[in-house]
Amino acid sequence: MSADHPNLVARVVAALHGEVSSATLESYRAAGAAVFQELAEVDAVRKQQFGDVPVGERSRRVAVWNALVPQVVAEALLDADYAAHPKTAGFVPPVTAEQAGRLFHIVEPWLAQARRADADPGVDLAAETALPAHLPAWVKAEPCPPEHLAAMVAAGRRMAGFAEAALADAERDPGAAKRLPLLRRLWAEADTAGRYAEGLMRPGASRQLHEAIEEKLHRALEIWFVLGQIAADPRLGEQPTHGQRAVLADPMSLPGGPSFNPWCLTDPVSRARWQADARAVRTVDLLWAYDPDPAATLTIQAEIDAALAAGDIATRTRGGKILGHYYCCPWSAVYEVRRPVSIAGQRLSAMEQFVFDVSAEEISEGGAFVRRVVRGPFHSTDEVDYCEPEGGHDE
């Protein structure tokens, strides 16, 4: 279900409660609903297929599953909030909006991969992306809204049904015979976690109990996500865990050092444009002048550069299209994750997009220097923000 256009009363009540519009999320929901048709098509092909399954078809099944799970969970988050607060249907708490946005954002890239594999039987996603993939990191909410827990319970029940069907399909798949013990263990672990969480649900539960329920529900959903991928492509049960790397900034690259490059944070593709812009040159210089810890900034950029060199992230889509850059100074490149990676202490999953946002804009007003990873989705815009501290630009 989705919310109708909210009326004036709903907008006023939502504003009083600090809720935000879910209109954009509803657009993502509508677009992502195509996954259910893709799932029906995959099931139809599966029923007609016997013996060895081509690698392209296995890749398609994995991609469809990886679009299905975040779509189902994100829909549940919106619907649970609308049901709990019908007077503000069409608006959700910021934490719900952020979590649903993270989930909806990875639906389209996985759908694109499913269609690519359908068109090209030779596509092998396991050779291109670290699989099984993981869900985007969960947004921390303290305390976790009861609607969040209800939504994840609903999503877990629905995913249990899909996972049960995936397990049944694997039991009929000769290529999955060696993976059946693993799949059954995953099934039992996810089912136990989900049922245990439901058993803990009580009206007026304490914050500690809410946290325990939330952890169990997250665990169940994450296991369902992995189970479906291995059931679709049994080779994934053999994939090694991708290790994280420790990266530090080169001391020579710090401001004042012989290797310092003030434009190192800027998207290389558009860098020349900004270097030819006198205002951009001034604001980049101000950025470094205000940075209280350049080593911390450059360490995060070093993590990004190392991940890019290793192929964990990319600045182009798989179709070769350049992703572009952020609209704010220092105009960081937009990156798409290929393999699970940790940047600035944040876990990023395959198909997520992010930028490295660095800003001194708030310092002149008593605010903090900003150094953070911003997750997508991102949209094309003609807007440019130089993000100057007050008084940094003379007209």
Image: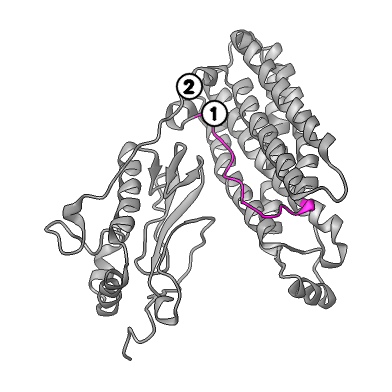
Within the image, what quadrant is residue 371 found in?
bottom left
Disc 2 marks which residue? 239
Residue 130 visible, this orientation: yes
Which x, y percent locates residue 94? 67, 62
**Residues at circles 1 and 2 in contact by the CB criterion of under 8 Å:** yes
Query: Is 335 within the magenta?
Result: no
Q: Which mark is residue 132?
A: 1
Instruction: Judge whether 178 appears above or below 34 on screen.
Output: above
Colour mapping used in the image: one colour
Which x, y percent locates residue 37? 72, 38
Left or right of residue 358, residue 230 in this image: right
Which x, y percent locates residue 97? 67, 58
Q: Which mark is residue 33?
A: none
Quadrant (top left, top right, bottom left, bottom right) of the C terminus: bottom left
Question: Could you tell me which residue is drawn at 37 percent across and 60 percent down?
Answer: 332
Within the image, what quadrant is residue 66 found in?
top right
Q: Secondary structure at mark 2?
A: loop
- Circle 1 crowding by C-alpha within 10 Å: few under 14, some 14–19, many from 20: many
Instruction: Judge whether 89 appears above or below 334 on screen.
Output: below
Within the image, what quadrant is residue 222 found in?
top right
**Numbered range of the magenta stretch:** 131-147
In the displayed orientation, state which residue is furthest to the bottom.
395
Question: Could you tell me which residue is drawn at 26 percent across and 50 percent down?
Answer: 249
Q: Mark 2 belongs to which amino acid?
A: Gln
Left or right of residue 23, residue 179 in this image: left
